[in-house]
């Protein structure tokens, strides 16, 4: 009888411990907006203000703080804010009297309010203008315009500064994204110029020519952002807020004619002013025109698509200026976008892939709804009456100047023109409306037209600013100093010259 072989007991398999992922800490930027909103909500509402309006203000403030610190992209913050307000509508959006109305459904009404911004004509005008910028990029027309100007005016540093300024001015009416226009089109060209003169970033040689060009380009886009209604996306948001808050319409031509006397003067003086206050070491040279000539030769002749795009954007501009009685500005923009699709200037896939345009559409649609909520709940009226009670001794013009100064100076606290416009403009308008005799159209113009020039103040004041700040040609101490100087010059001229001009035209 054979014995069964002995089977050795298997060695215990050592336990394989999966590496644990390090616990991610929630950044303070994400906690701060929530903390601020909760802190405001638990504080009792001020006297004379309904609790539901105070709760909505808490959500609104949380959104604004979120836009300032940006733990996640701005459009996502605004969407979350609208969603939270929609969910909490019975407590934050509607008064007990509204809720008690027979047949009133707060859930459905809140959803209608939350989506109202997506049906706003201004939002779609912004979107249409982004498509114009896409056409510039796809056809190369924007780059060609800038290179032609550089070739013609680049032999002297001062005239090169005028070429950069003129290039931004030509693009501004059709490019509402300052990031697309200045950081995306002008900056890539300007940054190629200093190395031709051995002017290097983060080096003492930066002052040879690079620093001068970078500051001139940035300051020019700030002026042009105030010059044209379609020169900066928040301008269109500001016009919509004026329409909702002050019940006033500001057309494209109203906007341009109000700022043009000041804006043209600033644009003419800007390159020379920078030349004096932040002078370049190199005053002249032939390298830049030669480089631009080579780049244009590489591009070849003017293409059919560039010619078609030029005709279409001129058509849009003509309709915006002269066609107001026949076609809405948004309709005109959508018409031109449709023609761009038919002529293959852009394709539907190009439009679908333009993340910035869709992101901006969501952002502005939700911000318009949030700003409307402040009016809907009565918060703006309460705040205006409270502030106006302390301005009883001021004349209407003095009160207007004070409000405009507060509006401009407060931009030091904001990292976004959009956030600033959303938070401050409704309040300034409401305070002005509560002052007897206030010329509201003049106040509205003075406030909204300062939006572009205030973006010169800080390295974070506008979309293109971080790009120029990060170029290595504008050290922090220079940027803050120049921001304060040029901010004072821009705003001072707007206040001293713009106030009487706007009063004479619109009061």
Image (spheres, rainbow, N blue to C red):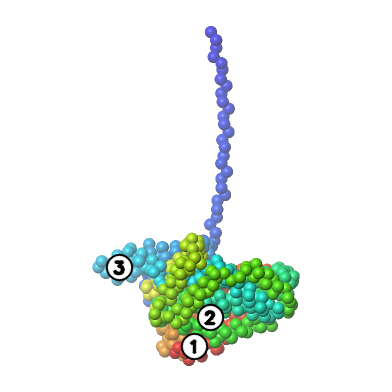
Query: Looking at the image, which is closer to me, 139 or 354?
Result: 139
Q: Residues within 10 Å of mark 2 (few under 14, many from 20)?
A: many
Q: Residues within 10 Å of mark 1 (few under 14, many from 20)?
A: some
Q: Please tell me whether mark 3 sits on a helix, a strand or a loop.
A: helix
Q: Is residue 275 left or right of residue 89?
A: right
- Residue 229 at x, y percent in the picture: 49, 78
Quadrant for the C terminus in the image? bottom left
Which circle marks residue 227 in the picture?
A: 2
Mark 2 and mark 3: span between their CA atoms?
45 Å
Q: Residue at x 60, y 82 (%)?
A: 267
Tell me whether the residue at label 3 lies in contact with that at label 1, contact meaning CB atoms closer than 8 angstroms.
no
- Residue 427 at x, y percent in the picture: 45, 77
Query: Looking at the image, which is closer to me, 94 or 133?
Result: 133
Point out the tag, 3 or 1, that comes first from the N-terminus: 3
Which of discs 3 and 1 lies nearer the camera? The answer is 1
- Residue 118 at x, y percent in the picture: 40, 67
Q: Residue at x 63, y 73 (%)?
A: 147
Q: Which residue is mark 1?
A: 502
Mark 3 and mark 1: span between their CA atoms?
44 Å
Q: Please tell me whether mark 2 sits on a helix, a strand or a loop.
A: helix
On the question of residue 427 being in view, the answer is no
- Residue 378 at x, y percent in the picture: 37, 75
Query: Looking at the image, which is closer to me, 224 or 390?
Result: 224
Mark 2 and mark 1: span between their CA atoms?
14 Å
Q: Which residue is mark 3?
A: 99
């Amino acid at each position: 009888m054979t014995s069964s072989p002995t089977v050795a007991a298997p060695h215990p398999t050592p336990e394989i411990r999966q590496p644990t992922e390090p616990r991610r800490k929630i950044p303070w930027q994400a906690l701060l907006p929530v903390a601020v909103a909760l802190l405001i909500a638990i504080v009792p509402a001020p006297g004379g203000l309904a609790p539901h309006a105070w709760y909505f203000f808490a959500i609104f403030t949380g959104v604004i703080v979120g836009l300032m610190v940006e733990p996640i992209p701005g459009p996502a913050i605004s969407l979350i804010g609208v969603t939270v307000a929609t969910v909490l509508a019975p407590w934050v959006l509607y008064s007990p009297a509204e809720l008690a109305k027979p047949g009133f459904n707060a859930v459905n009404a809140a959803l209608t309010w939350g989506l109202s911004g997506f049906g706003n004509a201004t939002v779609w005008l912004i979107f249409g203008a982004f498509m114009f910028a896409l056409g510039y990029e796809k056809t190369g027309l924007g780059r060609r315009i800038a290179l032609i100007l550089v070739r013609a005016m680049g032999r002297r540093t001062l005239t090169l500064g005028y070429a950069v300024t003129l290039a931004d001015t030509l693009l501004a009416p059709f490019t509402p994204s300052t990031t697309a226009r200045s950081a995306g089109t002008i900056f890539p060209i300007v940054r190629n110029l200093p190395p031709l003169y051995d002017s290097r970033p983060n080096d003492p040689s930066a002052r040879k020519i690079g620093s001068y060009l970078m500051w001139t380009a940035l300051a020019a886009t700030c002026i042009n952002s105030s010059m044209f209604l379609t020169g900066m996306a928040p301008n269109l948001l500001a016009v919509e807020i004026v329409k909702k808050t002050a019940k006033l319409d500001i057309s494209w031509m109203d906007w341009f004619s109000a700022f043009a006397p000041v804006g043209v003067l600033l644009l003419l003086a800007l390159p020379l002013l920078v030349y004096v206050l932040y002078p370049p070491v190199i005053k002249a040279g032939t390298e830049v025109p030669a480089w631009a000539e080579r780049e244009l030769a590489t591009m070849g002749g003017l293409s059919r698509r560039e010619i078609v795009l030029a005709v279409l954007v001129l058509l849009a501009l003509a309709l915006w200026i002269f066609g107001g009685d026949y076609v809405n500005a948004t309709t005109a923009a959508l018409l031109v976008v449709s023609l761009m699709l038919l002529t293959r200037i852009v394709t539907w896939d190009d439009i679908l892939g333009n993340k910035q345009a869709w992101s901006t559409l969501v952002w502005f649609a939700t911000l318009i709804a949030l700003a409307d909520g402040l009016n809907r709940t009565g918060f703006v009226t309460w705040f205006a009456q409270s502030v106006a009670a302390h301005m009883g001794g001021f004349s209407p013009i003095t009160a207007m100047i004070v409000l405009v100064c507060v509006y401009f100076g407060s931009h030091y606290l904001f990292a976004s023109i959009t956030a600033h416009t959303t938070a401050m403009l409704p309040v300034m308008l409401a305070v002005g409306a509560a002052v007897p005799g206030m010329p509201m159209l003049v106040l509205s113009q003075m406030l909204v037209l300062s939006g572009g020039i205030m973006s010169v103040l800080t390295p974070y004041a506008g979309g293109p600013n971080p790009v120029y700040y990060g170029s290595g040609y504008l050290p922090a101490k220079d940027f803050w100093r120049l921001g304060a100087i040029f901010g004072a010059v821009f705003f001072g001229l707007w206040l001293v010259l713009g106030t009487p001009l706007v009063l004479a035209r619109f009061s």
